Image: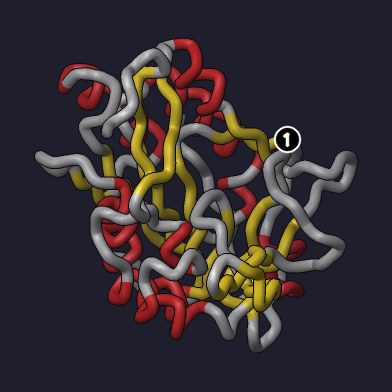
Amino acid sequence: MRVKVARSRGLGVSLDYDLTLVAGHRQALLSRTLESFARDVFPNFPIRRVIANIDRFMGDDAEGGRCEALIRRHFPDALIFRPETPDFASAVIRVWAATTAPRVLHLEDDWVALEPFGPDRIEPLFEPDVGAVTFMCKNKHTRGLPHQTARRIGKKRGKVVSDVLVNAFSTSPGVFDGKFLRDAAWRMEPGLDPEKQFYRRTNPFLEEHALPRRCMFLRGTVRRDLVADIGLQARADVGLVKLYKNGASVWRRADAAPES
């Protein structure tokens, strides 16, 4: 199935979009993601170019080849990277740096859309201080605000001396201002969790760029959530858990002994 993309004129918007996709060797998940977004999302966007990264994660190289074929079935002209060494942040940096469009729709291989949506709902959220629009899902906490935030607690001698909210960003799925995203890719550090680098004090150079900007929530019209994470259950089914350690997200067997 090839995705037919909308043209800007028909949508009443003037900005083209690049689509970036970060995937592993997870054919079943990728198939569900592409089927869902090809039905409800991609046709609504004026997509200029598709850039994907397929890391050696979970499946073997044969499955990686099938994942590449899946992407090309939808987007025959996609630029697809298949690096030898997997690294989450490097994958994000690679696809973001290759974009050129004013807007970028960024996606990972383990999400499904819960309803159709397009730029007509996204573009009005891009005020001058907005760097991205993130699609609402179950694990996002709004704190009663229209944009994403994180708590930053400061301690001195074991006592809390500050407790403030700072702007935070989600790397997937969502839409980014193209220049903001490419500048972020230039500042991002390989090896660290790409999302948490924006606000967890692990990359001050990226925070300097990101913290003055906001990441707006886009909610569903029939329910709160606009997208659903299908990766959590898939990891649980094979006994993997995601841990955050020393600035990086790592996946380990649930029954593995902790490192000393």
* Color scheme of the displayed model: secondary structure
**165 relative to 158 in the view: left or right:** right
Residue at 50%, 17% (x, y): give it: 236
For this orientation, the residue located farthest to the right is 222
Residue at 73%, 35% (x, y): give it: 114
In x, y percent, where is residue 192?
A: 32, 56
Residue linked to disc 1: 114
**211 relative to 192 in the view: left or right:** right
* Residue 9 visible, this angle: no
In x, y percent, where is residue 60?
A: 19, 18
Give the quadrant of the C terminus: top left
Is residue 259 depicted above or below 164 in this figure? above
Q: Nearer the viewer, residue 165 or 39?
A: 165
10 Å crowding of disc 1: few (<14), some (14-19), many (20+): some
**22 relative to 134 in the view: left or right:** left
**16 relative to 152 in the view: left or right:** left
